[in-house]
Image (spheres, rainbow, N blue to C red):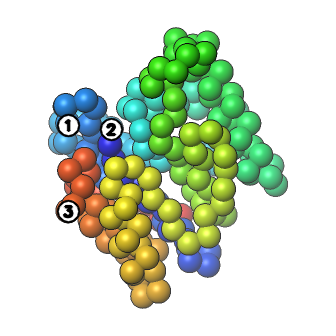
Amino acid sequence: MTTIIASKKGKKICIGADSLISYGDEARKYENTNHSKLIQTSQGFFAFAGDAAIQSAFTLFLTKAKFKYPKDIKKSLFVLFSQFLKFLEAECGFDGKNNDSDFKLTAGFLFANKNGIWHVDAQRFVSEVNTFFALGSGREYALGAAYSNYDTLSVREIVEKSLLASCNFDLYSAEPLEIIEL
């Protein structure tokens, strides 16, 4: 469980995440782990909300994948995540042929770079984000805060206030925050 959010205004873009890691009935605070929910690549930043094992597999996958987007980033992200699903089966032992929850990408990813923000959902549908978008267990709080502050705050302030709202109300989100301006 987590909260991740990205915001865009004009050419200004910011992405951020809380730092609590939880799985099952266990939670680990930032001080006890070395874990970032923002994954940096040469093309930008990925942020993930969902099963921690899927994020570990995705990080490993990115070391092997050649992700370079041409002019059509939506198509490139779709292809990347199609390859990732094959990687999960072939390299990580996830069985995509049954209905086990361990294989489903139950949440999603955000990808942000200096050109924009994109959301990739569990079915690999890719959509461009024009203002802000949040994922994870605290998304409702983050989206509400982003909506109420969008017209008056900078993108960094929107991300920060949204994550703080989520950390305040969502049991599965906690500070410190990780925020990156692009």
Give how far apart the Cα atoms at labels 2 and 1 are: 10 Å
Quarter of the image where the N terminus is located = top left
The residue closer to the viewer here, 111 or 31, is 111
Q: Secondary structure at mark 3?
A: helix
Counting from the top left corner in percent of width and height, residue 153 is at 41, 83
Task: Assign a secondary structure to mark 1.
Answer: strand
Tell me if 77 is positioned left or right of 95 in this view. right
Left or right: 34, with 27 as reference point: right
Residue furthest to the right = 71
x then y, percent, for residue 137? 34, 50
Judging by the rendered image, the residue that carries numbered circle 3 is 168
Q: Nearer the viewer, mark 3 or mark 2?
A: 3
Label 3 and label 2: CA atoms lie apart by 21 Å
Look at the numbered discs 2 and 1 and tell me whether their residues touch, using CB distance below 8 Å.
yes
Query: In screen coordinates, is 62 left or right of 29?
Result: right
Secondary structure state at the residue bearing disc 2: loop
| Mark identifier at residue 28 | 1
